[in-house]
Image (cartoon, rainbow, N blue to C red):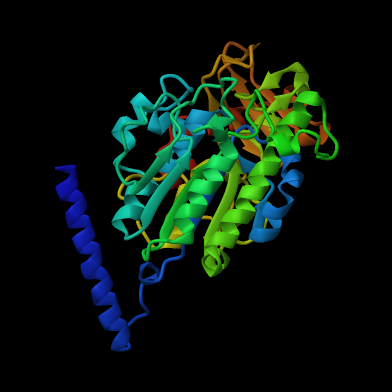
């Protein structure tokens, strides 16, 4: 039934494109963006921090584009973020709230992702690397034409080995093989690295490399793993040639990572180190600015670039549109990260403040001006507190961009 439905959608899309082209030739209207869509490349790292970005020097040079410094990870944890990137929905809507069980709970959503939408819109869709935690890599989800996923999702000591090679280099070579002889259809490439996830193992050639200032030896090893990612992006850009120059390219992490800040390590926290890491994007119509953007905005942005509409509800907004939000919903259900206790929470993350309601604790309010270190809830008036609490209550179960802001 799903296949038949997909075929009807594809048929309807083809008819619509033909009609638009005919009207354009008659001087009626301009052709749809879908008649000449760009290649789309999404590159995802794992547990990358804001201060890791300088290591990706060549990546930044080759992409150029726009850096969004106030890019918020609405659920700062791997599996929920990846589900959000694929669906454009918050975790409370797509249902993937922790890393476990992960993929089995996502199967019901797999017919409704950017992969299925782009595939039906005429894209050649290809995934390389990490998908969702716990997935069975013998099963190819709907919408993917080329499926080269690494099935080992748990953080093991051999995470940086795949098929007998250094993991990042294996991914690089597979992608270069594809883009060196690319399909004639527009390409949607979803490339997901393990780096710099712990236990971080740099490539042999980078084990003594200088990566600038670091917090600790662990941080230095993390950053060294990103050197191979930087090299991989260079190789892929060279292999794509002119198609790279016109592609819509986005690079982001799946969450940030604390390295001792606020006396804790890991992710699944409202602190900036875990929940705010810049997005780098080069895509027609996306402008550089300091607005509060979020992981839920990535899928709508990709679909807008492709000229393809979603048939499911999107919670985010295209970054090509002119909108602003004062704050974005953040939410977490994880109770432990890197051996450290976590309190599930919901909250509001603004440009220079964060208001959170941790499970079992009174609400908290922090300003970025003090590094989110001083709880300033007592400085707010009763009206201000009630406003924030009511605002959060409205967003906690929001659905759709109009409700979610």
**Which residue lies most toward the right here?**
213
Please report the residue visible at 58 percent of the width from the left and 42 percent of the height from the top.
169
The residue lying toward the viewer, choosing from 204 and 67, is 204
**Which residue lies most toward the front here?**
164
The residue lying toward the viewer, choosing from 271 and 61, is 61
Q: Quadrant of the N terminus?
A: top left
Please report the residue visible at 64 percent of the width from the left and 55 percent of the height from the top.
234
Number of marks drawn: 0
Residue 73 is situated, as x and y percent measured from the top left of the image, at 58, 36
Please report the residue visible at 57 percent of the width from the left and 67 percent of the height from the top.
245
The quarter of the picture where residue 339 lies is top right
Residue 181 is situated, as x and y percent measured from the top left of the image, at 44, 61
The residue lying toward the viewer, choosing from 298 and 395, is 298
Q: Is residue 384 above or below residue 319?
A: above
Q: Is residue 282 visible?
A: no
Please report the residue visible at 47 percent of the width from the left and 53 percent of the height from the top.
177
Residue 313 is situated, as x and y percent measured from the top left of the image, at 35, 44
Q: Is residue 257 visible?
A: yes
Residue 16 is situated, as x and y percent measured from the top left of the image, at 24, 69
Give the side of residue 330 with respect to residue 138, left or right.
Answer: right
Q: Is residue 14 above or below residue 350?
A: below
């Amino acid at each position: 039934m799903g296949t038949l439905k997909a075929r009807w959608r594809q048929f309807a899309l083809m008819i619509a494109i033909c009609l638009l082209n005919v009207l354009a030739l008659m001087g009626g209207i301009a052709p749809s963006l879908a008649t000449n869509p760009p290649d789309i490349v999404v590159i995802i790292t794992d547990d990358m921090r804001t201060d890791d970005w300088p290591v990706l020097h060549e990546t930044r040079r080759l992409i150029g584009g726009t850096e969004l410094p106030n890019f918020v990870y609405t659920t700062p944890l791997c599996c929920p973020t990846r589900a959000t990137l694929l669906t454009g929905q918050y975790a409370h809507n797509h249902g993937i709230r922790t890393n476990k069980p992960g993929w089995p709970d996502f199967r019901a959503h797999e017919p409704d992702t950017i992969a299925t939408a782009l595939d039906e819109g005429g894209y050649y869709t290809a995934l390389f690397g990490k998908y969702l935690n716990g997935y069975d890599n013998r099963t190819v989800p709907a919408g993917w034409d080329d499926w080269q996923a690494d099935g080992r999702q748990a953080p093991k000591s051999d995470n940086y080995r795949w098929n007998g090679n250094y993991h990042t280099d294996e991914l690089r070579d597979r992608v270069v093989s594809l883009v060196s002889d690319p399909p004639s259809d527009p390409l949607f490439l979803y490339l997901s690295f393990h780096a710099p996830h712990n236990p971080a193992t740099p490539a042999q050639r980078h084990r003594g490399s200088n990566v600038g200032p670091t917090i600790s030896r662990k941080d230095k090893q993390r950053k060294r793993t990103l050197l191979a990612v930087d090299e991989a992006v260079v190789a892929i850009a060279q292999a794509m040639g002119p198609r790279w120059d016109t592609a819509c390219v986005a690079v982001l992490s799946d969450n940030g990572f604390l390295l001792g800040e606020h006396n804790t390590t890991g992710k699944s926290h409202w602190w900036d180190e875990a929940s705010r890491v810049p997005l780098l994007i080069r895509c027609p119509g996306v402008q550089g600015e300091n607005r509060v953007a979020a992981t839920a905005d990535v899928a709508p942005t990709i679909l807008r670039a492709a000229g393809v509409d979603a048939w499911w509800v999107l919670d985010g907004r295209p970054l090509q549109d002119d909108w602003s939000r004062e704050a974005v919903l953040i939410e977490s259900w994880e109770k432990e990260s890197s051996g450290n206790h976590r309190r599930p929470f919901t909250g509001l993350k603004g440009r220079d403040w964060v208001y959170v309601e941790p499970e079992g604790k009174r609400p908290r309010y922090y300003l970025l001006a003090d590094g989110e270190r001083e709880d300033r809830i007592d400085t707010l008036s009763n009206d201000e507190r009630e406003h924030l609490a009511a605002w959060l209550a409205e967003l906690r179960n929001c659905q759709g961009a109009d409700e979610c802001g």
